[in-house]
Image (spheres, helix red, strand yellow):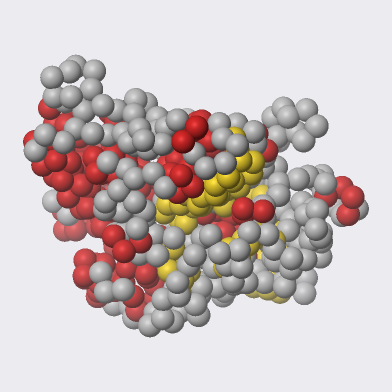
Amino acid sequence: MSERLVVDPITRIEGHLRIEAQMDGDNIAQAYSSGTSVRGIETILQGRDPRDAWAFAQRICGVCTLVHGIASVRSVEDALKVELPTNAQLIRNLMIGAQYVQDHVMHFYHLHALDWVDIVSALNADPAATAELAQSISRWPKSSPGYYADTQKRIKTFVESGQLGIFANGYWGHPAYKLPPEANLMAVAHYLEALAWQRDAARLHAIFGGKNPHPNFLVGGVPCPIDLDSDSAINASRLAQVQDIIRSMVTFVDQVYVPDTLAIASFYKDWSTRGEGLGNFLCYGDLPEGGFMDPATFLFPRGVILDRDLSTIHEVDLHEQSEIQEFVAHAWYDYSSGNTQGLHPYDGETNLEYDARGGVKPPYSQLDVADGYSWIKAPRWKGNAVEVGPLARVLMLYATGHEQTQDLVQMTLGKLDLPVEALFSTLGRTAARTLETKIVVDAMQGWYDALVTNIKAGDTKTFNETLWDPSSWPHQAKGAGFMEAPRGALGHWIVIDGGRIANYQAIVPSTWNAGPRDAASQAGAYEAALQDNHQLVDVKQPLEILRTIHSFDPCIACAVHLTDPDSGEDLEIKIT
Ligand code: NFE
């Protein structure tokens, strides 16, 4: 054992994540993932009206802008057994779908691509050859030699000015970059195009939810009325706009995102045998039909896969106390009943009493990995560390015989000439994100058509008011609201007492993936993935760590939050 490598903060993510890698020569032997900011939204929610919780909970994150609103209203609906009107469920599905497409496209181009694409090398590309390459993989119209020559000029201006701006700190020229200059230029052009294109997704949220980020929601439905005769409701012209947005999304996914993923992946096939990690995958399932969150109707199925065994899908119960639990043995929290056992979120605690343990809290030069080392807790399913997110969902769809998924997986593996085991890797995780975007964007057209058919048949209901009045509620109630957020399984658990919130806990996807070791010293998903075959070409430029960590699309703003336990004020964080 030698050096402990520290990468802090990991950039091109949301929030602050620190990775420490215990090196064995140039190989990662042990990896440690640490969320370095404190979480506290749960404490803010206590004592409030459950119908308002979504507006606070949604501020957990500004990236997956709507998911905490949805999980929150669903937790109250689950507690009170509220049935949603069909239109409300379809509108929520459309909003979730738009979030997926926007989030995944932006992740690929703006947060992950530059781990594989060398922007400086694009300067050496021949624009005519780039156009030829682009036209050979897609009929996307912006692929002429002149277009690529113009893009190259824009990059050149950046580089020559010595002000690479947001591109300044890349490991450009690193020997692990494998794309030819033409492929680099094509990808950079699409990076810039995706920046402008992603505004459409935000428009869909604004049409149904009034704004983006953080569109509006409502316990029992959606807040947008449908009235074809009104200018201030969902009417024929707004529905036509939604149709245009869906078409634009389908075109970009089909003609840019999918072909680019395949083209780039073909140069990085060595990444199909590293970065798997746990081999355990969890999905809560989502995208329902009908008025309740009934897993039998979900597009994304619910279940757990253990040890890569796709032939057995284990059932998941979010209410069962022994299934989902959070551990703090290696986190900077203390549970009132001791830190070796886990707590189900209904009984979850968010206290910051760690000081009493005498361990090392920031500032430090290295994490005290024998004790607590993260503000992220370690969630486990029946004691198992699991991965959540696109790879989990695609495996679940594949294992349960979803035809489109099986076709897409076969097409991808066929084009890359890789076996099905290649899915269990850093490359597989990134490809799965692209494939599920295609599945979701296609499903959006179906939800849209169903919504229009319903409206044409005279059904304009978007809100179920029957349980709006708290005097109709049981004195005590508990609910689990969940969804498949872009980064994976998301749950909000609420305990209602006398019409107020008695307890509230969120376990977000990045908590599952970025969490530290548990009481049994089992590594979390990031940690295990980095411990899977990561030899670094240059320990001073650990591009390999970025590739695997970014393949999960970390959002540490979701996994932790900033609050001062004494004053309740936000802490100020400075990165120098
Ligand atoms: Ni802040 Fe999120 C998503 C949630 S966290 S982005 O997707 O929930 O992983």
Q: Position of residue 535 (x, y in %)?
A: 59, 71
Residue 402 visible, this angle: yes
On screen, residue 80 versus residue 394, left or right, reads right
Image vertical order of residue 66 relative to residue 79, above or below: above
Q: Position of residue 23 (x, y in %)?
A: 71, 69
Residue 191 visible, this angle: no
Q: Quadrant of residue 424?
A: bottom left
Q: Nearer the viewer, residue 331 or 190?
A: 331
Image vertical order of residue 228 relative to residue 544, above or below: above
Q: Position of residue 519 (x, y in %)?
A: 74, 68
On screen, residue 564 versus residue 543, left or right, reads right
On screen, residue 46 versus residue 211, left or right, reads right
Q: Nearer the viewer, residue 306 or 294?
A: 294
Q: Quadrant of residue 231?
A: top left
Residue occupying image coordinates x 37% and y 70%: 395
Q: Which residue ends up furthest to the left in the rendered image?
A: 456
Q: Nearer the viewer, residue 191 or 483?
A: 483
User: In which quadrant is the N terminus drawn?
Assistant: bottom right
Residue occupying image coordinates x 13% and y 19%: 229
Residue occupying image coordinates x 25% and y 69%: 402
Image vertical order of residue 240 relative to residue 231, above or below: below
User: In which quadrant is the C terminus drawn?
Assistant: top right
Q: Position of residue 330 (x, y in %)?
A: 75, 60
Residue occupying image coordinates x 41% and y 76%: 313
